[in-house]
Image: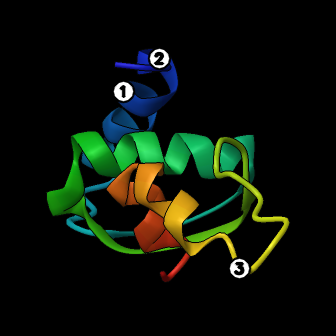
Amino acid sequence: MRNPFFVESLEAWRCKNKIDKLTLGGHSMGGYLSVAYCEKYPQHVDQLILISPVGVPHEENNNKKKDRAIIPLRYRLMMNT
């Protein structure tokens, strides 16, 4: 797992505060870490809000639909394609 310290720290905080489901919002590196948390603990995430997350490819040309097929599903879902 990538960045286990941050993911497990957030999970420990969630448990300590007795929160069943989170709405996570992340910008840049925070977006990357929010996705990592969602991948490990999807049952504890109600909503995910990403603002310019690190690791999500930037599409330079809208006509490159076939290139999207090589992008992992989780990123295609984030890009609403």
The residue that mark 2 highlights is 5
54 displayed left or right of 65? right
Number of the front mark, 3 or 1: 3
Q: Judge by depth and name the residue closer to the eye, 78 or 64.
A: 64
Q: CA distance from mark 2 to mark 1?
A: 5 Å
Which residue is depicted at the point 47% across and 17% down? 5
In the displayed structure image, the side of residue 19 where residue 57 appears, left or right: right
Residue 80 x, y percent position in the rendering:
50, 82
Kindly state the secondary structure of the residue where label 1 is placed. helix
Q: Which mark is residue 8?
A: 1
Q: Quadrant of residue 47?
A: bottom left
Q: Secondary structure at mark 2?
A: helix
Which kind of residue does numbered mark 1 sit on?
Glu
Q: CA distance from mark 3 to mark 1?
A: 39 Å
Please tell me whether residue 5 is drawn above or below residue 77 in the rendered image. above
Labels 3 and 1: the sequence-earlier one: 1
Q: Which residue matches tag 3? A: 63
Tell me if residue 4 can be seen.
yes
Mark 2–mark 1 contact, CB under 8 Å? yes
Closer to us: 74 or 32: 74
